[in-house]
């Protein structure tokens, strides 16, 4: 179950429609000869726009989270995996991974089964979430996106256990919105990855 995670549980589940976007600044311009020049920055973050399941008797958990965290404190979410990844993965064991800052791959150990490309992963205590861009069966190297922002080493989270640290975007209501009297329905919210 993907959603806003607090106190060891999902307090507000993501529902459709949902979008997960990669914000990777690219600057492009056309010259007078119509040749295109492109420059890409190293910085990248994930941005999620989603609706939340309407809540009634458990709405207080989300209300407290929205008000106390606001726009300045980080929140945690269970990162939604691509449906194609869910149907193909057979990953088992407790995989570990290592990688060097600036590289576009990691080395995976203690891994059995298939981790399909498009899998969101997180390694050790590093806060950045990456996506695999190649399949990985068993141990070995796997390409990731974006390039590693820091050295990583430790347990690799690659199932429905990838916890991402985010901020509520500034257009999210810091309070509650009720529909039909007892249902708290926040409409669409936007979360941006904490870097």
Image (cartoon, rainbow, N blue to C red):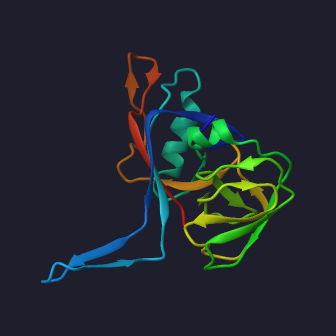
**Image coordinates for residue 164, horizontal then vertical, percent:** 61, 54
Q: Residue at x 38, y 33 (%)?
A: 187
Question: Up-down: is 142 above or below 137?
Answer: below
Q: Answer left or right for 21 relative to 141.
A: left
Q: Answer left or right for 112 relative to 145.
A: right
Q: Answer left or right for 195 relative to 27.
A: right
Frontmost residue, 86 versus 66: 86
**Image coordinates for residue 6, horizontal then vertical, percent:** 65, 43
Marker count (numbered): 0
Question: Up-down: is 160 above or below 13?
Answer: below
Q: Which quarter of the rendered picture does the N terminus lie within?
A: top right
Question: Up-down: is 149 above or below 88?
Answer: below
**Image coordinates for residue 108, horizontal then vertical, percent:** 78, 63
Q: Where, by quadrant of the figure, is residue 7 drawn?
A: top right
Q: Answer left or right for 109 relative to 128.
A: right
Which residue is outermost to the left?
32
**Image coordinates for residue 195, horizontal then vertical, percent:** 54, 67
Q: Where, by quadrant of the figure, is residue 81 drawn?
A: top right
Frontmost residue, 149 versus 137: 137
Q: Residue at x 56, y 33 (%)?
A: 13
């Amino acid at each position: 179950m993907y959603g806003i995670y607090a106190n060891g549980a999902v307090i507000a589940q993501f529902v459709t429609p949902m979008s997960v976007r990669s914000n990777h600044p690219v600057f492009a311009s056309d010259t007078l000869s119509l040749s295109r020049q492109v420059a890409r920055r190293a910085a990248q973050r994930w941005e999620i726009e989603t609706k939340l399941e309407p809540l009634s008797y458990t709405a207080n958990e989300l209300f407290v989270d929205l008000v106390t965290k606001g726009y300045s404190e980080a929140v945690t979410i269970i990162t939604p995996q691509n449906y194609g990844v869910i149907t193909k993965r057979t990953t088992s064991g407790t995989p570990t991974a290592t990688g060097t800052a600036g590289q576009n791959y990691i080395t995976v150990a203690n891994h059995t089964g298939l981790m399909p490309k498009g899998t969101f992963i997180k390694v050790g205590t590093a806060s950045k979430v990456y996506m695999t861009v190649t399949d990985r069966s068993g141990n070995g190297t796997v390409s990731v996106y974006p390039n590693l922002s820091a050295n990583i080493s430790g347990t690799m989270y690659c199932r429905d256990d990838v916890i991402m640290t985010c901020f509520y975007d500034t257009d999210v209501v810091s309070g509650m919105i009720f529909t039909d009297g007892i249902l708290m329905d926040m409409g669409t919210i936007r979360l941006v990855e904490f870097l």
